[in-house]
Amino acid sequence: MKPLTILIVDDSATMRQFVRRAVHLSDVPVGSVLEAANGKEALALLDAHEIDALFTDINMPVMSGSELLRELKRQGRNTPARIVLSTDGSEARRREMKGLAQWYVNKPVRPEVVRDVLNELASNLGD
Amino acid sequence: MSSTNLPATLATDRKALDRALAIVVEQSFFAMVDPVPSEAPAVEGAIVSACVTFEGSFSGSLTCRMPRALAHELTAVFIGEEPSDGEAVDDLAGEFANMVCGRWLTDVAPQSLFRLDHPVVVPASAPSRAPSGLLNGQPIWVELKVEG
């Protein structure tokens, strides 16, 4: 399996660093890990790179995670795999994200949850 | 819990707030919030305040205050290394408040959607009231304001 290219989108630099650490704890081979502080920056990176997995926050200035995911859906992109990491664990938010992201993880995030998601993703890619 | 009477009762209900704080501390920082002894420890050094405002079926703000030294310790645990600058510590303090606020809103209003603004982090003074708890032996204050 080729190493995954991963994009982490969060307006908090420390949260991006936390997710980056958690990503490297997984058993999955990881190549580049890119970072963006909002959805707009993420779209630019998605246009310039072949990204396998996208971790995104919801509440961000400039362009939110919801707007980013809706834009990816509007563009009809099948990749990257989409994982939402959000402080908002409400049922309403989960419903909103259905069809926009494959995984929804509540913050605070345990590092092993990120690892489990990546392992599952790698397993799906291997099928 | 019905959302109709939320604003009237939430500001005085500390249990959900204490629960949210405990979950964030345990899951992200591998620590525990200890009860405050009758004589709270004196605060030494600077205090940092991080405020998150939220808006949805009701609105308000949640503020976390803690010694800057504690925010520094939490940052190191969170990112796995000593923070290289004060900006990372401020960012962590904001993310901490953001996580407590999100966790609390999820607990008290699971059917509602909320927008959380980017946290505002500023230097502050220690509140005169008792801390919400002790973390790594240092006080932490969590304050909630809820509007209709």
Image (cartoon, coloured by chain):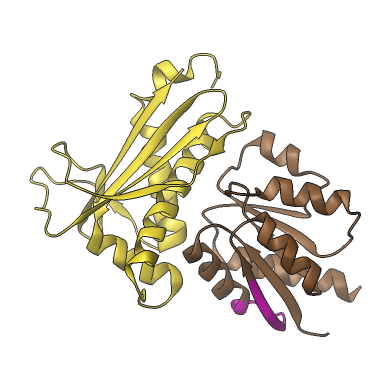
Chain colours: A brown, B yellow
Residue B12's spot in the image, x, y percent?
33, 24
Residue at coordinates 40% horizontally, 60% vertically from top-left?
Answer: B92
Closer to us: B136 or A19: A19
- Numbered label tally: 0
**The quadrant where residue B95 appears:** bottom left
Q: In the visual, does B34 lie left or right of B96?
A: left
Residue B84 can be seen in this image: yes
Residue A65's spot in the image, x, y percent?
67, 50
Residue at coordinates 20% horizontally, 59% vertically from top-left?
Answer: B137
Instruction: Report the magenta residues as a range.
Output: A24-34
Residue A30 is a magenta residue: yes
Closer to us: B83 or A87: B83
Q: In the visual, does B97 lie left or right of A28?
A: left
Residue B45 is a magenta residue: no
**The quadrant where residue B127 appears:** top left
Q: In the visual, does B147 lie left or right of B33?
A: right
Residue B106 vs A60, above or below: the answer is above
Residue B97's spot in the image, x, y percent?
40, 47
Q: In the visual, does B111 lie left or right of B139?
A: right
Residue B82 vs A2, above or below: the answer is above
